[in-house]
Image (spheres, rainbow, N blue to C red):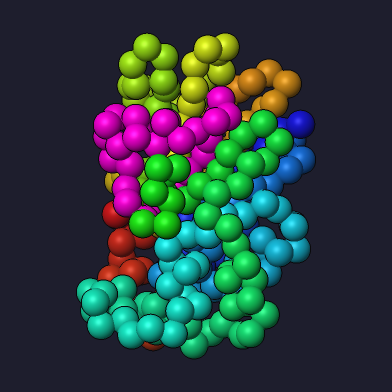
Amino acid sequence: MKYAIFGDIHGNLEAFQAVLGHAAQQGCTDHVCVGDIVGYGANPRECLDLVRQMGCPVVKGNHDEEAVLETSLEGLNPLARQAMEWTRAQLDPDDRAFLKSLKLVRQVRDFTIVHATLDTPGSWTYVTNKFDAMASFSYQFTQLCFYGHTHTPRIYVKGDTVEPLEATSVKLEMGRKYFINTGSAGQPRDGDWRASYATYDAPSQEVVIHRIEYDIQTAQDKIIDAGLPEMLAHRLSLGK
Ligand code: ZN
């Protein structure tokens, strides 16, 4: 069984379709989503539809949560507020019910999925170094966990110590734990504009993070045409 694990899609349909196409070529049979299906991009509903059609396990991201709240967006910066107001206006009652139903943490077969961290999943804090990863590892009861939220692919390994790997693939070893950020499908922020996602081949115990080119021009044009802030289109090319 081979899984495609993706998240931080953020309404970028072109990137999401490219990821799914690549995953099919890789022989993936199962799909898993680590959250933030909506927010920023111009196709939140289309991305939601794809996720629902696949019936794949999903956990809730902070944008998925924010999109269905009725609270004021005053605390957000103007860019995020404008994008979130637009996203909220797109969703219908079924979309909102689906997003509300999502859990913060799930176990899928022998691995766990979460959007932000396992130690405080609903606080939306960021794992940006090995100390953050260590805190999350103390709540990780499976050997393998996938997460997102930082929009930066990263593999943390816990043996005697916790260290990030430089590599973009890893073969799981007995006695070690792995906390793996799939990177962002729809809005990467590590300086590489290409869509990011992970595959997990259960029989060979291998995880690989992939980078996929997609039709970024169309995704950017749609953002402009929707009247969303231009910066949201521009940042896609920068990978920031
Ligand atoms: Zn995100």
Name the one closer to the observer, 238 or 153: 153
Q: Does the magenta segment cover residue 138? A: yes
Task: Provide residue 105's location: percent of width, then percent of height.
Answer: 55, 49
Q: How many marks?
A: 0
What residue lies at 47% left-to-right and 69% top-to-bottom?
65
Task: Provide residue 63's location: percent of width, then percent of height.
Answer: 44, 67
* Vertical side of 184 occupied by 232: above or below: below
Task: Provide residue 202's location: percent of width, then percent of height.
Answer: 69, 26
**Whether residue 51 is visible:** yes
Residue 97 sits in which quadrant?
Answer: bottom right
The magenta span reads 124-149
* In this picture, residue 171 sits left or right of residue 109: left
**Whether residue 189 is visible:** no
Q: Does the magenta segment cover residue 143? A: yes
Quadrant of the image containing the N terminus:
top right
* Vertical side of 198 occupied by 173: above or below: above
* In this picture, residue 240 sits left or right of residue 106: left
What residue lies at 57% left-to-right and 12% top-to-bottom?
174
What residue lies at 29% left-to-right and 54% top-to-bottom?
240
Task: Provide residue 74's location: percent of width, then percent of height.
Answer: 25, 83
What residue lies at 43% left-to-right and 51% top-to-bottom?
121
